[in-house]
Image (cartoon, coloured by chain):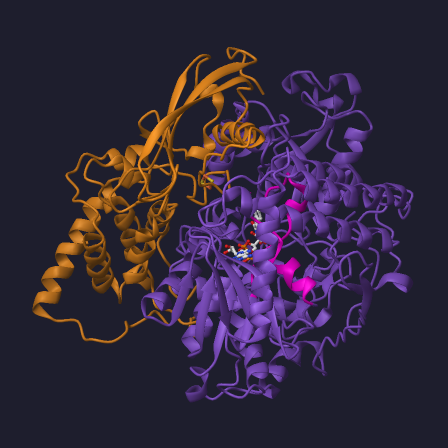
Amino acid sequence: MVAPSTPPHLSLTLRVWRQAGPSQPGRFVDYAAPGLSPDMSFLELLDVVNDGLTTKGEEPIAFAHDCREGICGTCSCTINGKPHGPGQGVATCQIYLRAFRDGDTIVVEPFRARAFPVVKDLVTDRAAFDKIQQAGGFITARAGSAPDANAAPVPKPAADLAMDAAACIGCGACVAACKNASAMLFVAAKVSHLGLLPQGQPERDKRVLAMVGTMDALGFGNCTNQYECSAACPKLISHDFIARLNRDYLAATVRSAFQPAPAGTGGGAG
Amino acid sequence: MATLDPKIPSGPLADKWRKHKADIRLVNPANKRKYEIIVVGAGLAGASAASTLADLGYKVKNFVFHDSPRRAHSIAAQGGINAAKNYQNDGDSVHRLFYDTLKGGDYRAREANVHRLAEVSVNIIDQCVAQGVPFAREYGGLLANRSFGGAQVSRTFYARGQTGQQLLLGAYSALSRVVGAGLVELHTQSEMLDLVIVGGQAKGIIVRDLVTGEIGRHAADAVILATGGYGNVFNLSTYARGSNATAIWRAYKRGACLANPCYTQIHPTCIPVSGDYQSKLTLMSESLRNDGRIWAPRKKEDGRKNPNDIPEADRDYFLERIYPGFGNLCPRDVASRAAKRMCDEGRGVGPTGLGVYLDFSDAIKRLGEAGVRERYGNLFDIYHEITAESAYQTPMRIFPAVHYTMGGLWVDYNLMSNIPGLFVLGEANFSDHGANRLGASALMQGLADGYFIIPYTIGDYLAGQKPGSRPSADAPEFKAAEDHVSGMTARLLGIKGRQPVSHFHKRLGKIMWEHCGMARTKAGLAQALREIPALREEFWAGVNVPGSADTLNQSLEQAGRVADFIELGELLCLDALTREESCGGHFREEHQHPDGECKRDDAGFAHVAAWEFQGAGRTPLRNIEPLNYEFVKMSVRNYK
Ligand SMILES: Cc1cc2nc3c(=O)[nH]c(=O)nc-3n(C[C@H](O)[C@H](O)[C@H](O)COP(=O)(O)OP(=O)(O)OC[C@H]3O[C@@H](n4cnc5c(N)ncnc54)[C@H](O)[C@@H]3O)c2cc1C
Ligand code: FES
């Protein structure tokens, strides 16, 4: 429904980052987009512009998207300098044109970070997040070995807080928003989610050391407590989890210095 | 003509799976690492299968078209996952879950498969909790449950409105662990474009690297497809935009039978279409029907009024009226058709007249706004973002939308297709939901297939394959398949027509929705079967795919998928036309009871229709697998 204050049609100019490939230079190109409905989503606007380009025989703008409802973490545009654009607690795909004014020029770029190289136009490579996850973002529990699900009650506050952290969609807006391109919020969310649960205890130290070590090795920067990350997070994940991560990391470092963790695969909850 | 032996074990229903596990062949631990298994897909089904098979010792290669396995469409599931834990002590049991699922599917699924699903459902919850899935809990720390449609017990486990996300992240973490340990070779942004058959068995795939455009050949001892559903054949749906049918369609064209393609699910509670530019429809989870009440105005002229100004007496809570036994929690197909009937009668609401209300005012009176927010806050937020309306103040407007496909590649009890060595898991197969899937049971099925079924059943096949006997990727069959794929790419890029791919997808979607949507008729389907081949011709003459094959080219990806959708759409309509009955999500107007309910024809159609490709331009063959009900009597579904 059109909110009463919004005009029925908008005309916008898109200033879009075009870059043919990872090693090619990029530049901004302007596209006029007239006659738009305010109920249209921002990605639908890109669809419309792309259909226009295709009809003219030009290459459409490459952009990442999939679920278009804020949960898969694929969409990743920096709009007017802000990862995921205007609005709080939403992803790029949840931006609707009613957020803009008639006649606005909208600047659209890919997420910028050293660890996220541009693949093409607005698409970046965020495989570094998977690598961090592979280093330790799990609880070892082979299928078939689990005890009854209600065998170990989890206090509701801990379960709720774990869920708050687990809501991360892995989009990378936290990294793009941080002037140091730090991945601390991403790592903190996973470390907190698993560390808050009883099942996550056996591998807790190993996990935090491995994930932080991998994050550093992949070229993400340091956290200097500016908290731009939480502000840009489409799930508004709290930077309190970063403090928790720091405590966990410190404790694990101390413990591992005195008591080296045995080699081999982890303990497991089963 | 394909042989369709469902290989259902003999014996009493409740013993079949246990007995089968004890009877099937095993691969000895030292030999497991000599076998390579390809898993295509890393949604709930693929990620759980890949990680479990790797833990067992097999060498696994996992392919996804997404840039990370965590982005599979399973991530979007909101409401929950069923399991017969009976933690609520409200009378649930494996048998009841089995029965509800079979009945929910309108008696068009296999008894033995559905029973096994209900049996392993309890292990799934244990497994997920052990992995750290943060399910909702009660104050005492035990797991909480909610109710879903088609059931009179509370057996649905959930993690706020993000159950699929949390289950997928659990499976993704298990997958990440084995990838990190070097046990699984992960290929992201790699789209399977063909299945390679050597000596009558599935032995590999052809893949395009979506970033470099490179075409790769991969050989294996067995191939697992866990590539999700094909609902985007309707263009507008609740699926992610990238969800597609290419993997199963190309396997079909290599001889795998496609079963019951016309069984598609239209979900009753989605946000209505707002304009022509629309790219997707957003689901409002079925869990909302626990507390929301669905109604339409009694008077046609009230359709455009502010709903808060329509007095109680002028509201028709039609589900509660027609189905007092299940009320707002009747199954999806039933609820969707009821909403459609209201709109057909001219009592729809909103600017297009295609909508009914889902109203929380009673729930807010009972639980307070905070109570409702605690349960459904994120869904209300989504609704607000999309419509700019607050559902705390005015009722939500909802309309049915395409949501799930029960049909899929035919598989036997071992989840193997009619092509030996090709296994199909999750939404991509046809096996467990009959003609209608109940809410919260797709997640259950995906994880059942991946964690608990395929790890056993694939061993039975591999034990018959000599270790080291897999063909080399240099075999002529691989070369031929690769040439085929490259040829199709070149053809698509060479057309240089006038219309973007989306133009054809939209038109296909309109044909499908109009003639093969919530209500189907013989004449409509015949019409669709004339329009779709014409559209296919237009596509191959008039599509414009800019750019080249050797870079990221999203138009090219989309073109291949839409080309497949057009062909699949035709088969879907043919299946719908041939099935001269109504059952579950397949409603033929000619076959209904006087009150508008589905009229099944058990004498004529209590079977699976498994379509077999006969070559381009030739009518596919309709194979039949009879559904023999030994333990349950097929009866008329009654939710009244
Ligand atoms: C909005 C929404 C909400 C839902 N809510 C619920 C719910 O509450 N409860 C419930 O039980 N069910 C729900 N469902 C249904 C359920 O989410 C899906 O049926 C289920 O998650 C499908 O899982 P899957 O593993 O089979 O496939 P998917 O999760 O779709 O995964 C498919 C995988 O295959 C890969 N793939 C596909 N094609 C290729 C190819 N050609 N080459 C390489 N890789 C390929 C993809 O990259 C992906 O990894 C919901 C569905 C939707 C749309
Ligand atoms: S497209 Fe999935 S989060 Fe935006």
Magenta stretch containing residue B233, yes or no?
Answer: yes
- The number of numbered discs placed on residues in the rendered structure image is 0
On screen, residue B24 above or below B323: below
Residue B554 x %, y %: 51, 43
Residue B585 x %, y %: 75, 49
Q: Which residue is drawn at 86% across and 55% down?
A: B578
Measured as percent of width and height from the top left, residue B159 is found at: 46, 50
Span of residues in magenta: B225-254
Q: Where is residue A19? Give x, y as percent.
A: 37, 36
Magenta stretch: includes residue B294: no
Q: Is residue B445 visible?
A: no
Residue under the point 58% across and 87% down:
B464
Give whichever of B296, B64 is nearer the camera: B64
Q: Which chain is orange?
A: A
Q: Please state which of residues A64 and B157 is positioned toward the viewer in this rendering.
A: A64
Q: Which quarter of the picture shows residue B523?
A: top right
Quadrant placement of the N terminus of chain A: top right
Quarter of the image for the C terminus of chain A: give it.
Answer: bottom left
Position above or below: A269 against A176:
below
Regarding residue A47, the answer to whether it shows in the image is yes
Q: Going 42% across and 71% down the picture, which residue do you hit?
A: A147
Chain (purple) = B
B324 lies left or right of A88: right
Residue in the image at 24% along x and 57% along y: A211
Q: Quadrant of residue A137?
A: bottom left
- In the picture, measured across the screen, residue B586 lies left or right of residue B246, that is right
Quarter of the image holding residue A240?
top left
